[in-house]
Image (cartoon, rainbow, N blue to C red):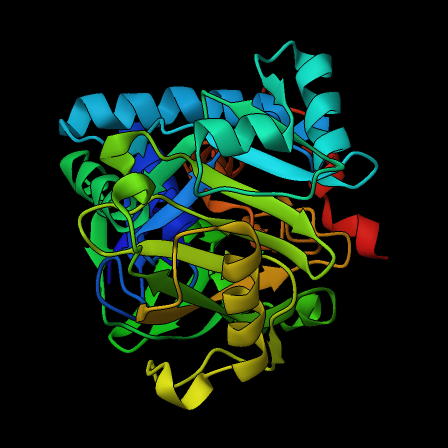
Amino acid sequence: MAIWDVIVIGAGGVGSATAMHLAKSGVRTLGIDQYSPAHDRGSSHGQTRIIRQAYFEHPCYVPLLQRAYDLWGELEQHTNQKLFHRTGLVEIGPADGIVIPGVLHSAMTHDLPIERLSPADIRERWPGIDGNNDWRAVIEQNAGFLKVEQCVQAHLAMATHHGCDLVHNCGVHQWSSDSREVKVTTDHGVEIAAQLVIAGGPWTHSLIPELSTSLKILRKHLYWFQPESDGFQEKNGFPCFFHETANGFFYGFPCIDGTGVKIARHSGGQPIDAPDLDSSTEITTDSEDRKLVIDYANDYLPGLGSTLVKTAKCYYTSTPDEHFVIDQLPGHENVCVVAGLSGHGFKFASALGEIASNLALRKDIPFEIEPFAIKRFS
């Protein structure tokens, strides 16, 4: 039976980054995931994720994002891959809404470069993006998208390069801890370590039942449309986009690799008790969600059309305030958890992995993570 310094449960977006940072620190690291590498069963898949710095959710995220940008750049260099595509991001909505004031506040607080535009400016520059005439818009040129599966695979490859042992297609049945060690029971037996990091995404419910009342799992749907014109192509300068509308938040990506324009609804979602056992999207279709997305495309993406060529699903694991959980688990001084990323966490994965590694190794963390403490739920 191997004795590890740290075991990481979950090897998705955050878990893969955590495993890499731990192994890079020279500690004996074991990463465990119940599915194959960069799988499509959780929250870290679906081709792309938006990455941005002028964060409308709260300015406290910006320092984390600045570190994440640096780390994504290092990962690209070390793996000789282009993971971050700086297409720019157009955000558009009411002047007194949530998105535009939030973006402007974060940009002002952290002196971030953004350009203010009107819907008419947007229509002239990108005819495929529209908005109500009384709305406002901004473009963040230093934003874009991450190739999500490639990012996970790159972190896993670098974790292995630095000596991490990764075990995939292996379920975790239970774990326990005392002041000396943690024990993790898997399909293959019992593993023992000094520290445990849990990065289980929507499976955090079952891994940490005491957090289940503070974490809501939402099934989300992704859609790809075949555009009717070439104007939606990344190669032709089309950006990522995010709309705040009367029907909620919607976002999307330019057409890349010939797979169509990806659109999804950030609002809503189907509440579920646990991730689906079947990975098929056919048995989990949300007809209301699909109609809202098609109506959104018809209203605000002129020329896209409604030819749907692909669908997928993923999960949000959301906290009541939609802020993250990054903390040591109360009552378990050698167990750290990163959870509740609430549908906006992947862009931070590189930095969250570094933070989780530092938590496990009792190193200083140069960020204010008090807003993400578990005690706020009580």
In which quadrant will I find the C terminus? bottom right
Return the residue nearer the eye: 195 or 128. Answer: 128
In which quadrant will I find the N terminus? bottom left
Return the residue nearer the eye: 365 or 103. Answer: 103
Query: Residue 250, image x and y in percent?
Result: 57, 54
Query: Residue 117, image x and y in percent?
Result: 62, 23
Q: Is residue 243 above or below residue 84?
A: below
Left or right relative to 291: residue 304: left
Q: Is residue 24 above or below residue 269?
A: above
Left or right relative to 101: residue 263: left
Query: Residue 65, image x and y in percent?
Result: 53, 27
The residue at the point 55 percent across, 51 percent down is: 300
The residue at the point 22 percent across, 66 percent down is: 36
Q: Is residue 26 above or below residue 177?
A: above
Residue 364 visible? The answer is no
Please tell me how many numbered marks the rendered image carries. 0
Q: Quadrant of residue 76?
A: top left
